[in-house]
Amino acid sequence: MKSKIHLQKLEDYSIEKVEQFVRDSLDILDPEASMFSPGQKVLLKPNLLRGFKPERCVTTHPVVLEAVCRVLKDLSVGQIVISDSPALGSLSAVADKAGYGLLEKKYGARILPLTDPIPFENEEGVPHLKIAGCLEQYDRIINLPKVKSHCQMTMTLGIKNLFGLVIGKRKPVLHCLVKNDKIKFGKMLIDIARHVNPCLTIVDGIQAMQGQGPLNGTPYPLGVMGASTDITAIDRIFADLLNIPLDKGYALQAAKLKQFGQFDVEYMEISGPADYRSLAVEDFKQAYPLDISFDPVRLLKSFFKQFYEIGIKEPGHARWERSKNLIRPR
């Protein structure tokens, strides 16, 4: 059976158009409507790397999350939870900056931090790998990556996005422990993806990030959304759209080696445009590669940044907001 992928050209974040894309995707990928049931608890896993406004293209756009919430509400899902483990800052502060606050007010979605890190035995033998044990509480997980270049792994899409389910400061340590073996790191990502097993991946590629991603790149108007139940297949198609050499797509190479998902386009059924290659671009700027070897200075800097962000900056901002409310004319 071929892996199904649905693509659509979308120029802007119109909630009506994005919502229709989500509905069309479910009609194509889940024709028997068996993926979601009334009363289920569903986790939405966006990319919430750092606390920036949506136009910076660091995080999954809030309209994509809103569209998914609308559809899930219509399907009578019992509870919607949004979660990730930001590299810097608390989840609540990062989600607020990313524009997710309205999702709690309008749809009753809850923004909850990942909890209960448990040891994760992986085939690559990477030590100290722990994943959020709270994932067991959810009936379904929807993966909502942002299309971004990546200075260590070339691109970050569906497979890499699930690395956010490794809690907190373990992530930079794990980057270092693979000693710049990017295929080994990719294989670890595949072990995580196989374990998490999201029921659906919806890719936010309306405004992508090019250059020195995943944080310091610039917006790029790719204008494409995609969806699939096969995380490898959707990553492969977007690699093609961005003209990324497959030997530089380290997570994809790892998926091929570990026989996870569909790598071969010949065994994919792509709906949307008559020829998906018509959506490909030629001028997407890739990142200059950086190694992922051990650097204790970088790890210490990362630790102190996180301590400052959560321990000093965020509480100080909250106090300032409270003081403004106290003196604001009524």
Image (spheres, rainbow, N blue to C red):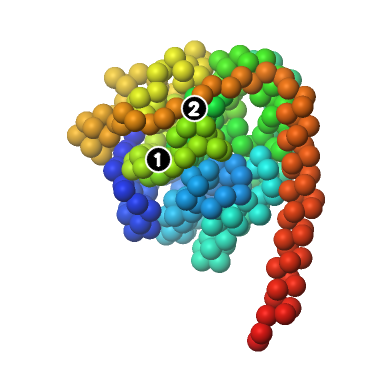
* Quarter of the rendering occupied by the N terminus: top left
x, y percent for residue 281: 31, 31
Which residue is located at x 54 percent, y 21 percent? 289
Residue beneath disc 2: 287
Q: Quadrant of residue 47?
A: top right
Q: Amino acid at mark 1?
A: Tyr
Give how far apart the Cα atoms at labels 1 and 2 are: 13 Å
* Quarter of the rendering occupied by the C terminus: bottom right
- Disc 1 vs disc 2: Cβ atoms closer than 8 Å? no
The image shows a total of numbered marks equal to 2
Q: Quadrant of residue 87?
A: top right
Q: Looking at the picture, tell me which residue is in the foreground, 162 or 239.
A: 239
Which residue is located at x 44 percent, y 55 percent? 63
- Disc 2 on helix, strand or loop? loop
Residue beneath disc 1: 220
Q: In this image, 104 relative to 245: left or right?
A: right
Q: Amino acid at mark 2?
A: Ala
Q: Is the residue 30 above or below the residue 99 in the image?
A: above
- Residue neighbourhood size for the residue with mark 1, other residues' Cα within 10 Å, grouped as few (<14), some (14–19), many (≥20): some
- Disc 1 on helix, strand or loop? strand
